[in-house]
Image (cartoon, rainbow, N blue to C red):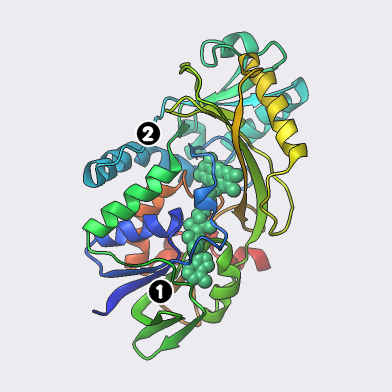
Amino acid sequence: MRSDFLIIGGGVVGMAVVYGLLRAGQKVTLLDAGDDVLRASRGNAGLTWVQGKGLGMPRYTELSLAASNAWPAFADELSERSGIDLEYHRQGGIDICFDAAEAAARISSYNELQASSPYLSRHFRWEYLDRQALLSHLPGLGENIHGGTWSPHDGHCNPLLLLRALLTGSRQLGLSYYPGCAVEHLSPTKAGFTATTPLGNFSAERIVVAAGLGAKALSPLLGMSGEVFPLRGQILVTEKMPLVPQLPTPQIRQTNSGSYLIGDTQEHAGLNRDATTDIMALLAARGVRIYPHLKNAKIVRAWGALRVMTPDGFPLYESSTTYPGAYNLNCHSGISLAAFHSNELAQALLRDQLNCEFSEFSSTRFSK
Ligand SMILES: Cc1cc2nc3c(=O)[nH]c(=O)nc-3n(C[C@H](O)[C@H](O)[C@H](O)COP(=O)(O)OP(=O)(O)OC[C@H]3O[C@@H](n4cnc5c(N)ncnc54)[C@H](O)[C@@H]3O)c2cc1C
């Protein structure tokens, strides 16, 4: 069976697009490499977040806001189809400010963002709360916290269950799925594109490279930049603790099972994805500063994973001008944008309108 679309990469970006295309009735083949490659979708914090997105590019905030608004219906539909609860909650979120300087900078940047777009001035909602006001959102908050920004658009989910649900739902919709299938070469053909792999050649009319950090090697083969670099983040996981009704924060959040995830580091470490003792100590101290009751909590796990970063940190959605029908997709917040990728972005791919409808996100911005 020849597919309409060949998708390279089964991380959350590729899977969301796969799911959207299948729902639109397309025949889709997914090729995904093995556990030995870099996979941000299996190492992230699970936030569905709007705060802080798009500083310097208001269109990205608008996109994040649209994704946040689409998430509840997306989660309901996907859970119903797959039978998997994504542990998704959207009750708002807090981005903590540890001192007055951080608070002042945050307030100023959010004010500036709102002033830059009439849409955002109406729709992007946030508020600065001092420590006392934060206590009702973050019971147990430490004394040594200055405050934080609250926004109703933020939420969180279990990112591994999201990935599993997308795969389960996609298989039900007829996905042809080849795991452990690393693409070695991509080439244009008369009728579309061919991917060369150790399992043989796969062809389709159109092709989407959603290979995370693998884009750098693959996308230039089809005339696209795939301009991404790794930025490491580390996460500490505590033992299961009694559930407390606290809103999620980028710095720390409690999962449905009771574990706390403590993270939010941004490290230039090349392709090294180790967890390191210096950062683990820093994260543990920060976790206890936020929630002193964690002082005696046992750490049961720690990991490092590499973010997929573009030069300016904003999404990169490319259509090849050399080889029409080839696309490259990269972004730093694939969980937050999953509902958007599965809906509007998949629709734009289907109509071949990616660079018309989302021109701000093409690679031409890097050469300006
Ligand atoms: C520590 C950390 C915390 C994060 N927290 C959040 C968060 O809270 N919220 C949020 O929205 N985002 C978060 N992110 C970012 C998020 O994880 C990424 O945006 C997202 O996972 C990117 O998905 P992807 O599918 O593009 O890439 P990946 O997950 O890296 O997937 C790429 C896929 O391509 C495949 N591949 C690569 N090369 C080939 C090849 N040659 N042939 C075939 N397949 C190939 C790989 O097997 C892989 O499955 C975080 C990231 C990190 C590292």
Q: Hey, what amino acid is under mark 2?
A: Glu
Q: Which mark is residue 350?
A: none
Q: Nearer the viewer, residue 14 or 35?
A: 35
Comes first in the chain, label 2 or label 1? 2
Residue at 45%, 34% in the rendered image: 156
Q: Please name the residue that numbered disc 2 is placed on.
A: 87
Answer with left or right where residue 326 lies relative to residue 285. left
In front: 217, or 223? 217
Q: Position of residue 76 (x, y in %)?
A: 27, 38
Q: Which quadrant of the rendered structure holds the N terminus?
A: bottom left
| Residue 152 versus residue 112 in the image, above or below | above
Secondary element at tag 1: strand
* Label total for image: 2
Q: Which residue is mark 1?
A: 207
**Quarter the C terminus occupies:** bottom right
> Which residue lies most toward the bottom here?
190
Q: Residues within 10 Å of mark 2 (few under 14, many from 20)?
A: some
Question: Relative to residue 38, is residue 200 drawn left or right?
Answer: left
Asked if the beta carbon under badge 2 is closer than 8 A to the nearest atom of ligand 1, the reply is no
> Compared to 280, does 32 lie above or below?
below
- For the residue pair 122 and 217, the one nearer the viewer reads as 217
Q: At x 22% / y 41%, what residue is drawn?
A: 80
**Which x, y percent locates residue 312?**
66, 54
As drawn, which residue projects farthest toward the top?
A: 132
Whole-number angstrom distance, CA of label 2 to CA of label 1 = 32 Å
Res 174 → quadrant: bottom left
